[in-house]
Amino acid sequence: MLKRILFKTDKKCLYKFIYNLGVKGALGFNRFQKRLKKGEFFPAFHFISVSDDCNLNCQGCWVTGKKTKSRLEPEQLDQIILETKAKGSYFFGILGGEPLMYEPLFDVFRKHSDCYFQLFTNGTLLSATVAEELRRCANVSPLISFEGGESVADIRRGGKDIYRRTIEAIDNATNAGLITGVAMSVCKSNLDLALSPDFVNLLIKKGVAYLWYYIYRPVGENPMVGLSLDKDEIQRLRNFMVDGRMKYDIVIIDAYWDGDGNGLCPAATGLSHHINASGYIEPCPVIQFATDKVGEKPLAEIYRSSVFLKDLKKEVPQITSGCIIMEDPEWLANFVERHAATDTSGRGDEAERLRAMPGVPSHGGGIPVPEKNRMYKFAKKRAFFGLGAYG
């Protein structure tokens, strides 16, 4: 795997990956840990939705159904990055909607060449030309969503010919020498594919560096609760990942378990938070409530004074080590109302939706399965899983 990455990755992209993400990322995480020891708080990194615009209509997407689409002003995005860098953090996850529809995106990548960006994309706009532009920027890793085979992908994504277009995006990215990732939001309709050795080996053959498994969360205008995994299916996924790290020549990432196999919530730990396309600071992308907004005060002051974020970090771990929005949506609705938090979903009825939604299993239950691979176990002790922590 290491040989494949070393020899097939563009040399400038490889350097930025090692230095901007590896070296500076480790230093940034150390600063985060030191802040915590001193009783101070500022996330180790941010992930940022730059735009609500998207060319697909996915099941369970938190962006769909908004009354008005928002986009971060370039000056807002620049200020977020500058204030985060001032705290020694240089890693950012860039989300949407579809971030490749955000026109100033490449200007941001070029301006902040000392940072490293992970680009969450559905891949349909990742042409060979776009991949070449990302190669020239060198500080971006595209993370391409892969939601199922030929029939399932179109249903999951609300589009046409999605499977072929996703494969084409992967080829464009790897052919350009990019550090390329593939992400899957694992649900009932794609579980068999997710756990298929043929699927993993296909990605390896195509030169994908890392595979990122998420657990499907029923959120947004069309939450599709019936797609949620049950406890046994979540356990199967966990076992597959732990075993797969021992036998597949690809990095397998999750955002849900520590090195001992215990559940965790990155938002509840404070490792990362989400800034949406309207500038609201949310615990994570699927908890669409906030009491603070970018530009009202410096980020450092917001994190120092936010009772909403402080209480969430204190109270959620007392209820679950899993996902609160899945396991107890009514509690979350009561919590945000108690803090008079703004509904940032853009739909205006998120608390009502949460109260009407039945709870579903998340990664907080189940039998703990410790990591078998010593490198993964070490990485998770350092930063849960090395690249970052997305909830």
Image (cartoon, rainbow, N blue to C red):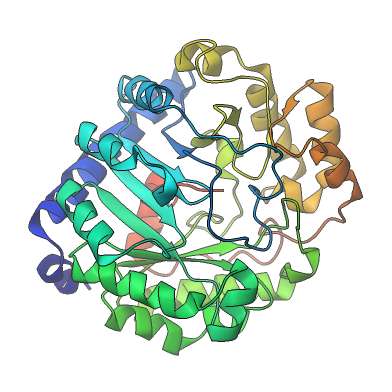
Position of residue 40 relative to residue 91, above or below, is above
Please give left or right for residue 381 compared with residue 304 in the image.
left
Residue at the spot 38% in from the left edge and 51% down from the top edge: 119
In the picture, residue 266 is in which quadrant? top right
Using the image, determine if residue 331 lies above or below residue 56.
Answer: above
Judge by depth and name the residue closer to the eye, 358 or 377: 358
Counting the numbered discs, the total is 0
Tell me where residue 108 sits by quadrant.
top left
In percent of width and height, residue 36 lies at 46, 24
Question: Where is the N terminus found, in terms of image quarters?
Answer: bottom left
Residue 199 is situated, as x and y percent measured from the top left of the image, at 44, 84
Residue 126, can we see it?
yes
| Residue occupying the point 59% across, 40% down | 284
Residue 250 in view, yes or no? no
80 versus 189 height, above or below: above
Tell me: 375 left or right of 175: right
Q: Residue furthest bottom?
A: 198
Identify whether 266 is placed above or below 273.
below
Q: Position of residue 235 (x, y in %)?
A: 64, 72
Residue 302 picture location, percent across and down? 54, 15
